[in-house]
Image (cartoon, rainbow, N blue to C red):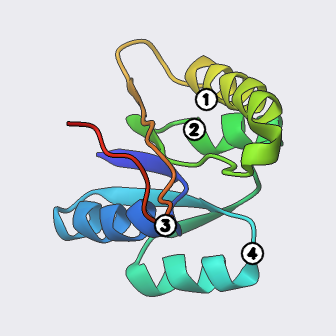
Amino acid sequence: MRIFVTGATGFIGTELVKELIEAGHKVRGLTRSDAGAEQLKAAGAEIHRGDMQNLDSLRNGATSMDAVINLAFDHDMSNFARNAENEMKAIEALGSALEPGKVLLVTSGVAITSGGPGPTCG
């Protein structure tokens, strides 16, 4: 299966790309940086340069793929509403490039945070 992964060089994406390749899938990973491109190359993935705001790049990355896994999200919490709007646009762009019957997997999660002692839920 040919799979396009956004967030391919992130915390979860790094491990997912390895697992997919080890399982015999062909992976195309989105990256913004030269370091990310080197990381993807070392893992055996195809490199797709771009970012989540470049919708044409996202559509091009998703074209001819059997599946898209969207792991990327801008975790700048001071601009959360804007980032969520950008995420919706990115998901629409990714989905628009897939042929009928192909898969778009969208993930969500909670930012990893640490803090001091506080109230607990009980």
Q: Of label 2 and label 1, which has the lower sequence position?
A: 2
Disc number lying in front (2 or 1): 1
* Residue 74 versus residue 32 in the image, above or below: above
Give me the C-alpha separation between circle 3 and circle 4.
34 Å
| Residue in the image at 74% along x and 51% along y | 76
| Amino acid type at mark 3 | Gly
Q: Which residue is mark 3?
A: 116
How dense is the environment of label 3, judged by Cα within 10 Å: few (below 14), some, or many (20 and up)?
Answer: few
Please report contact status of discs 4 and 2: CB closer than 8 Å, yes or no. no
In the picture, the disc for residue 83 is none
Residue 66, how many percent across, how many down? Answer: 38, 35
* Residue 18 versus residue 13 in the image, above or below: below
Q: Which residue is mark 2?
A: 62
Residue 56, how many percent across, how many down? Answer: 80, 36
* Residue 6 versus residue 22 in the image, above or below: above
Q: Which residue is mark 4?
A: 33
